[in-house]
Image (cartoon, rainbow, N blue to C red):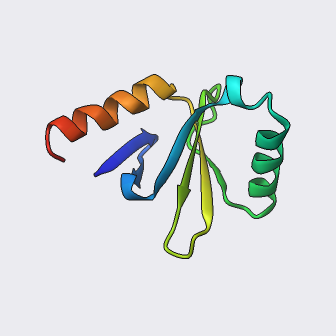
Amino acid sequence: MYLHLGNDILINTKNLIGIFDIENSSTSQNTKNFLSNAGKTDRVFNVSYEMPKTFIVCIDEDLKETVYISQISCATLRKRIKIAQTQGY
């Protein structure tokens, strides 16, 4: 199943680690360090240049993490996953 993050960006939910609210979770020093390190390795992608609401962490076949910054809220992304699951996608 695929999840639309905005601006024609889709991710495979098999690679999805988590969806995080940027405002609430970025207050933690661990999260700040994680996002900073991901940015240094060029593994952070802005899906939109609007006000960011979430960051999505995925992992690829080589166990490398990729972070997507999206303007879509956590609640909306979770609803999209739930709808797709109930429809059998």
Residue 74 shown left or right of residue 41 in the figure: left
Residue 52 lies, in percent from the top left, at 64, 29
Q: Residue at x 40, y 31 (%)?
A: 78
Residue 3 shown left or right of residue 22 in the figure: left
Front in this rendered view, residue 63 or 53: 63
**Quadrant hosting residue 32:** top right
Residue 75 shown left or right of residue 58 in the figure: left
Residue 26 lies, in percent from the top left, at 75, 31
Residue 41 lies, in percent from the top left, at 76, 64
Residue 28 lies, in percent from the top left, at 80, 32
Residue 76 shown left or right of residue 52 in the figure: left
**Quadrant hosting residue 27:** top right
Q: Residue at x 45, y 40 (%)?
A: 5
Task: Please tell me whether residue 80 is drawn above or below residue 40 in the rendered image.
Answer: above
**Quadrant hosting residue 62:** bottom right
Q: Residue at x 76, y 41 (%)?
A: 31
Q: Residue at x 19, y 47 (%)?
A: 89
